Image (cartoon, helix red, strand yellow):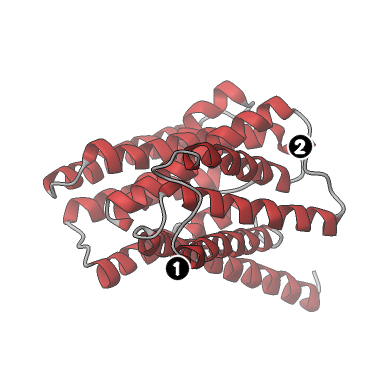
Amino acid sequence: MTHRAWHLVQSSKVQGAGMAVLAAFLFSCLNVVIRFSEPYLTIWHMLFGRSLFGVVFLVCMARTLGVGLAGRSRIILAVLGCTGSAGVLLLTVALLRIPLFQALILFYTYPVVAALISPWLTPDTNSLRDWMCIALAFVGTGLTLWSGGMSGLDLEIGHAAGLGASAFMGLTLTLVRRVSTVNSPLTPIFYISSIGMLASIFPMLHPDVGFMVPALGFVWVAAIGLFAVLAHIATNRALAFIASAKVGSISMLEVVFGAVYGYVLFSETLGWSTVSGGGLIIAASIGLAQSEPSIPGTKR
């Protein structure tokens, strides 16, 4: 390899890492916007606005690239659209009910879920290292939940929603991997956004929810949709330069950002068990990401 070629490779890696960090930052900003929008929006308005922005962006991007979004293996795509939108919904519930750090750290157990169910749905298998990482993640999850209980938080709602989001997202990524060879990377995100948009319409038909929101609510809807779209753009750009395993590892900076925002903006404190549990989950997830084959698709 010539000096110029080596320099170009290194430059691409730096650019990819930078875009992955930007994606983590944008996703963390999305989490904060969701928190601040709660007085003006229901969770259904949040999901609808985010999904609508996603559909519009993906349609425009697909036309620009000249690719189709309908895809192949449409039954599987429809299923992952349902599980993906359910994961986004439950993560939003967790973000609203428990500290940001705990919500995100429970969500980031999704690589463990993917590792557990992948052998049943894909040709992937788990190595001894993978099982060790899975065990670490279970210990970390236990410490995080114990911390929540000690803090008097609502384990029945917020923590359960965080784990539910992890389960649905782990299943979603496994299904994405199953159909990734015959579909554009944009297609799974399109199905998740489309089904999320449709699913959120029905609750808004109820008089207690409704379609109308305060004037400031429209601003927050736009902010949620914009940050979600920008985060996905940054993630896709990162994947163009570096492997998905590295993007997945760097994306866990979102948890760090969440801890900082929680402390500064919402006066959330971190106990030793929360930090210890979070550290084990992050280490386990990074270990699983480094041993996983590349999975084109979406985080959320």
Label 1 sits on what residue type?
Leu
The image quarter containing residue 31 is: bottom left
Element carrying mark 1: helix
Residue at point 40%, 62% (across, down): 37
Whether residue 108 is visible, yes or no, is no
Residue at point 62%, 56% (across, down): 53
Query: Residue 77 at x, y = what percent?
Result: 67, 32
Query: Residue 226 at x, y = what percent?
Result: 58, 64
The image quarter containing residue 112 is: top left
Residue receiving disc 2: 181
Residue in the foreground of this view, choosing between 162 and 146: 162
Query: Residue 171 at x, y = what percent?
Result: 53, 32
Residue at point 23%, 52% (across, down): 274
Query: Residue 178 at x, y = what percent?
Result: 67, 31
Say whether disc 2 or disc 1 marks the residue closer to the N-terminus.
2
Element carrying mark 2: helix
Residue in the foreground of this view, choosing between 184 and 192: 192
In-image side of 212 versus 182 (left or right): left
**CB under 8 Å between discs 2 and 1:** no
The tally of labels here is 2
